[in-house]
Amino acid sequence: MSYSNYEQTVIVNGHRLLGVQSVDGSYGISEKPIRVAGVGFIDAMSDAPLQGNFSINRKMVGEDPLLEKNSLGKYLFDEQEIDGLVLYDNDTKGFGFTKGRVSRYSVNCSVGNVPDIQTDITVYGSLGKNVLKNNSYTQNLNSSYYPTNLSQVYIGERGSSSNVVDSWNAGTLITTDEKYSNIPDITRERRWTSTVSGITYRWLELGKDSFTLVPYGAVIEHANQSIQYPDQSSIKFNVSDFSIDAVVDFSYSRSINVVPLYALQKDGVKTWNSGQPITSPNYDPVQIDTQYPIETDISVTMIANTYEIREIKDRLQNAPRSEISIDICDANDHANIINSFVGKNVRLISESINSTTEEEMNISLSYKSYESYHNEV
Amino acid sequence: MARPFLRFEDGKITLNNKDLMVNSASLSISPSLQVERVYGDYDAQIAGARTEFVNFAPTQNLQGQLNISFYMSADTVSPNSVNRLFELLEVADPGNAKSSISEAPINGNVVGRYSFDNMFLTSFNLKLEPFRLIVANASYNIYGTINRTVDKYFTQSDVDFAHALKSFGEVKISNQATDEEFEVKSLSYSINVERKISNKIRENENTAINTYAGGALPHRVSVESITSEVNIEGNEMAENLNPYGDQQTSSSPFGIDDSLVDIFLYSLGGERISRLHCAGKIQNQSMNIAEGSHATSSITIKQIIK
């Protein structure tokens, strides 16, 4: 069976991403061939940590959930791990990852096009099928009696404490594979009238017919995001170096070097004496750190008007810093910022002038800034 | 077509007449020579005698060294099973090497196209690093000469090699369990054997020793001392280190237990291979911070076995 290009959903940190154009997920295992004198090649064995890569290309048609910031105004993805997956086959199959770190985030925009977002993620945790799969079972009640609270709902027969429903969230029932496998097929409504008080108690004993398996049911936490399109009139590019010249395209990218630290498994003589191997080897790093500074590169191309390229010696001697802000707003409401990007204390590192017989003369400027961990520069 | 140079695949390594899976070996042998200079005949031009070089004279036994690097494995049928290795290393159990390092020579050794006898272990070490295959190293001293033999190969498959992924370690500073934040990046374990050679004058003065190339051989190669050492590379140093090499948290430096390191080697298939143990005093510890990397600590613990 094949899966058409309409059937995939990309989830990152519980957000269903908008405007996804392409996704590439891969992993590689570094093997060392074992060669022995007098024998030659014998086997090849893993000799380095497992790492994967996930690359997502999107059109900016809404607020990007990855750009969430902390109270200090820093992007959460600079320091936090993310997880995600590609869902397909009616959301029953998935290719997921855990412990991902954004290694590059870039936005490219030019007149006439919706801005493109490319996100490169390095995966240090799990990657592949069934990752993030939680096999939740959602409510599919086939009963005339709808209980109103947890005490009236049992998975399987009432009386067994292990069968009590885990949660009752506004009609959504969640259970585990183990409990699901032990329950009867048919849902039953039960009643019991107390001979002392005369009160009739009603409850529901859920069978398999009351559940629908949703393999990745709890993964999507934020499914409904509003679609907002920018157009060229709703994108504002402000730089302190010029104001009149018309910007025709720009790019913004953040490159993050991430350093994973791996450690040996800690265990003792008790495990050794048991004769059994360790149950959970250290596949994942014990620490994943961003290696600062984070480099931000901003390039802009403008139609030459009043701006003139400066003399290179002036740039070297003065190395002035500029401020850049990019606001990408909703085409229908220019006051509504969809996403914004800032370049603080950026340095102009290159300038170029392009003149052809086909187009207007344009000037390209490249800026660079560095973000530190503690020390604001 | 002639093949004057030996291929890696044809260079079988055999120690004690037993094949071994070695990924690198270095065999060297050298005589200890002293230059003999004497005064020559009378020279009238200088009214004296000129100094003349006569020959090189051997001052010690012919001595060589073998360094091998090899993969450890779990399979009992494998040439690198732990029993085989410890047998070749003259150690029944490195964790309890006190009574088991032999003074007997290891004979019947072949490296590629050369055979030799009279080999004695001087060191054994290995390093455990995350995700890495475990490669052990051993060094031997050799006395006597080497002989040419034919090159050979053997076949081997489906070996369950020792791997750090399933192996683990335990570190106790002054017998106190380290806290959860104590992480170990690597563990290096080594056994060093100091040996002393004894020569009998009468044995070595007999002209019969020159009738074969090996010349004079030591009468005995005794074990003078055995030490084991573990180096822990991690994130923490031992705090409150006292002059006795212990972590002192009380008002007295006496009665503090040794620091302990256990290394439990497993194969990638989950089979137990060996437990290496070192109980001793902290010899040194250091902390390094450099641009572009995290701070890393190094703690060395040494045990005197003999």
Image: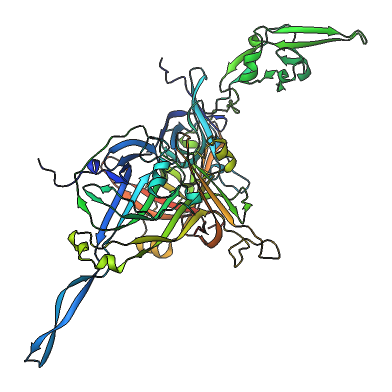
Q: Residue furthest bottom?
A: B47
Q: Is residue A238 left or right of residue A43?
A: right
Q: Residue furthest right?
A: A196
Q: Horizontal and vertical percent for residue B246?
A: 61, 61
Determine whether A117 is above or below A216 in the image: below
- The answer to whether residue A311 shows anywhere in this view is no
Q: Horizontal and vertical percent for residue B73?
A: 41, 39
- The answer to whether residue B132 shows anywhere in this view is yes
**Which image quarter: residue B221?**
bottom left
**Which image quarter: residue B198?**
bottom left
Query: In front here: B140 or A328?
Result: B140
Give the mark count: 0
Query: In front here: A47 or A176?
Result: A47
Q: Horizontal and vertical percent for residue A236?
A: 50, 42
Q: Quadrant of the N terminus of chain A?
A: top left
Q: Is residue B283 left or right of residue A114?
A: right
Determine whether B105 is above or below A170 in the image: below
Q: Is residue B147 left or right of residue B201?
A: left
Tell me the residue at 30%/69% (across/down).
B201
Query: In front here: A189 or B179?
Result: B179
Q: Horizontal and vertical percent for residue A307?
A: 39, 53
Tell me the residue at 40%/48% (across/down).
B136
Determine whether B203 is above or below A352 in the image: below
Query: In front here: A312 or A302?
Result: A312
